[in-house]
Amino acid sequence: MPLPVPGARAWHYEREEFGVQVFRTSAGLPVLVQRRPGAIAHLGWFVRGGANEETAENAGITSLMARTALKGTDRRSATRIAEDAEYLGGVLSAAANTDGFQWTISVPLHRLDEAAELLSDVVQRPSFPSDAFESERAVALANLASVRDDMYRWPVRLATEAAFGAHPYGQSPLGTEQSLARLGPVALRAWHSAHALEAPGVLVFVADAPPEDVVATATRYLGALRPGAGADVAVPAWPAALVLHEDERDKAQSALAIMFPGPARDDPSRIAMSLIAGVTSGLGGRFFDELRERQSLAYTVMASPIVRRRAGTFMAYIAMSPEKEDQARHGLLAEFAKLREHPVAARELDQAKTYALGSWAIRRESASNVLGDIADAWLFGTSIAELADYEQRVRAVTAGEMQRLAVRYFDPARRVEGVVRGRQKTI
């Protein structure tokens, strides 16, 4: 049972996990506090959902809502918000991805109380002024144009659309020109009311301050937030056969993204899949050594898992001269076949584990990363305790487990591709 705090009515203490104190407000909203040495305090409101609840008609509304909320509230103009954040020595930001969205602020520790008030204003009382909305919509349209001209992001986007089709995971969080044209301040206000105030969300604080004081600050300023169930997202069906999405550009190179299905966020095998990326990608990885160094097929080659709450993919990307597209594709597929047919060498596995653990240790040195990791584990993982288990889970991965994953997922007949073809230059 939750332990009541003497003299307090707005919140109670529940438990501790991996150094994180778990509290609940009187409304049932979770507040997670990690006391961590440092001169900077970090806090944020993180929500599960948003973009994965959009349709083709309003795609991009979550990202637009999150960013426009920074440009005006019932109490502050955009200029005032920027000046107040600067006065506090803080960084106020918003972000949205396929599975969630967030508002965060980082400030010197002695400004924590004022930062919580500023964050609460942006989160709870955005006004979505028309001029700010138009400015942010223009930024969103520019971002869309930039993606289409990017020889990495555009083939990856094409492959993602090929993989997930009409499922929300197939849509870009940025939206489309058509969907953005249909949106307006009224739509953003309604979306915010429905998805940001009563939501499957969590308040997270990482600060060198007594947790009881921190949660009291949270309840004092962020009392309009309420827990909500949110909408569930269906597990997408992966295509049963090859799907190819393609485009052309007046460029001297082509780029190919190949995707296979992969583990979702709550699948423990995602750790082993990340080590497959460690073996194959990077300057010393198999793909680089074979396709660039030995066969001279690629300008760039890399591989990475992409993990979402309800699905995952494993993506390989290669950029090459237009005339080498078929060779590059065959070369990539041959490397995937090797992963299916033979276990990785002990040396490769050890190097991948060393890199993963080193990257994790570096990541944990950043309090802002810790803030995001706590929110991610709470909203999308099994529990905060999974953060404590990460190193053990990495060390436990075997070459046999990785090969079984390759056999399960890397079926060339079920791959999807996004390709942007350059035009060969003639003289």
Image (cartoon, grey):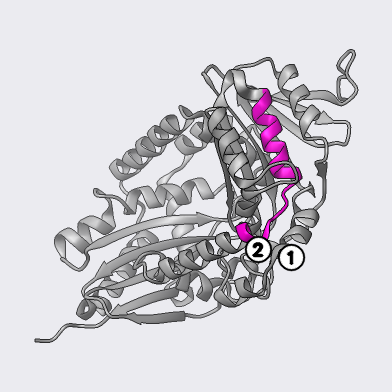
User: What is the C-alpha distance between the residues marked 2 and 1?
Assistant: 8 Å
Residue at 64% across, 24% down: 112
| Discs 2, 1 touching: Cβ within 8 Å | yes
Residue at 21% across, 75% down: 252
409 versus 125 height, above or below: below
Res. 61 mark: 2
Quarter of the view holding residue 13:
top right
Viewer-nearest of discs 2 and 1? 1
Quadrant of image for the C terminus: bottom left
* Residue 8 on the magenta segment: no
In the image shown, does 393 or 197 lie closer to the viewer?
197
**Three-letter amino acid code at the position of disc 1:** Ala
In-image side of 164 versus 418 (left or right) = right
In the image shown, does 362 or 405 lie closer to the viewer?
362
Q: Which residues are magenta?
A: 113-132
Res. 348 mark: none
**Three-letter amino acid code at the position of disc 2:** Ile
Q: Main secondary structure of the magenta part?
A: helix
